[in-house]
Amino acid sequence: MVNEQLAEVSNLLIVVAIVVYILGLIGFSADLAAASQRRSDQRLAQKQLVGAASAAVPEAGGGVFPSAGAGDGGGAPAPRTMSALTFAYGMTGVAVLLHLAGIVLRGVVTQRVPWANMYEFSMSGAAVVVLMFLIFSIRRGDLRLLGTFVILPVLIVMLVAQTFWIVPAATLTPSLQNSHWLVIHVIIAVLSSGLFGLGALVAVLQLIQSRYEAARAGLGAAGASDAPAAQAEGQDAGAGAPVWGRVGSVLDRLPGAKPLEALSYRIHAVAFVGWTFTLIFGAIWANQAWGRFWNWDPKEVWTFITWVVYACYLHARATRGFRGNKAAWFALAGFVCVIFNYTVVNTVINGLHSYSGL
């Protein structure tokens, strides 16, 4: 018997988590904007310093240069915006705890693992993405600037699930009851899907960063003859110039395309191992539930297609020459398969895995 009051508390925890995630997103966005502004201020100070030096006429072997610290406000240290970052991490930490509490409470209420339908799977996968981001960003400080780009899609998934996929807390269908393979198979699928989502996000940022770096290199190759025009547009000539305005200033603060590609590859490699076990344990579960290891069910077929696409990506990525944007697009093709398998197959195509609850 499902305790409806506790089920409502579980749902309330998820809603509050969404609100706190929004506060965390605001904090990450403020930190990213402040970092970009500091970069712009540094460039402006450097241009003023160079202009003052070129305008001055040295006499008797001396030069007219600002004293140390004059270019940054008379020696005063640049204001630090760690408070915004601390606020963002604090809110995200509180949100993920509320998020996990809501998921666990739903499992307690239904007396089963809380990922038996699209709503629960989405909420669990979103929590995995946030947890993985926190772990990676703690280990590598430069990844903190990805917070805005991680929390925003997580919020979108949670809002879609809360609006369109939410179903009342209920017990499992008979074919799913009393099977420990449900716990093993689905939890690995949740973890793998969350990692695939995080890897896809990094791949998208890699593609954007790659185009920006190419544009920036093109501006640098233009040479000194283009410097007056660039300065007239408020840009610096040479490498490092923000050729995309404010967007370029933001991208300047993110890791480069090559580090992002390496990170994407590592995330996908771990996720692929999990997806392999998802297939294996799913076959064992299918044999226990329906008497056959493989039933050519649409969900099974698309899970295998997804596995093949990611296997090709990892193999091609390990081959010399298949790097950069080509690898990123290949990885995104795999994530398209994940999305199709999770949305269209679950909601449109009927099969043995029609447990969306919709």
Image (spheres, rainbow, N blue to C red):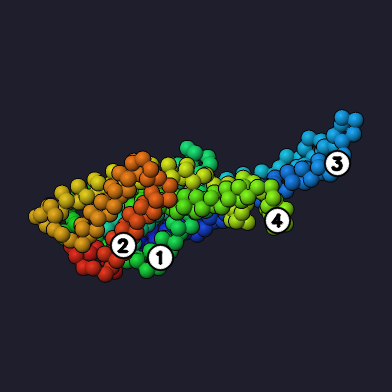
Q: CA distance from mark 1 to mark 4?
A: 46 Å
- The tag earlier along the polypeptide, 1 or 3, is 3
Q: How far is mark 2 from mark 3, CA to CA?
A: 65 Å
Local packing at callout 3 (Cα closer than 10 Å; few below 14, some 14-19, many 20+) is: few
Q: Position of residue 203 (x, y in %)?
A: 43, 51
The percent coordinates of residue 79 (x first, y second) are: 70, 44
The quadrant the N terminus occupies is: bottom left
Give the label, 2 or 1, closer to the camera: 2
Circle 1 is placed at which residue position? 160
- Residue type pointed to by label 4: Ala
Could you tell me if the residues under marks 2 and 3 are in contact, i.e. CB atoms within 8 Å?
Answer: no
Residue drawn 90% across the image and 30% down it: 60
Which residue position holds label 2?
Answer: 340
> Rounded to the nearest whole Å, what is the CA distance between mark 3 and mark 4?
23 Å
Q: Which of labels 1 and 3 is toward the front? A: 3
Q: Residue at x 36, y 52 (%)?
A: 330
Q: Secondary structure at mark 4?
A: helix
- For label 3, the residue is 56
- Residue 20 in the image: above or below residue 54: below
Residue 108, x across and y down, in percent: 31, 53
Q: Nearer the viewer, residue 221 or 277?
A: 221
Q: Which image quadrant is residue 68 in?
A: top right
Sequence-first disc among 2 and 3: 3
Q: Secondary structure at mark 1?
A: helix
Kindly identify which numbered label has been placed on residue 229: 4
* x and y, in percent, of residue 313 in the image: 32, 48
Depicted 333 relative to depicted 162: above or below:
above
Residue at the left extreme, as displayed:
291
Using the numbered discs, state the Cα–Cα distance from disc 1 to disc 3 in whole angstroms: 61 Å
Label 4, label 2: how far apart the Cα atoms are: 47 Å
Q: Nearer the viewer, residue 201 or 144?
A: 201
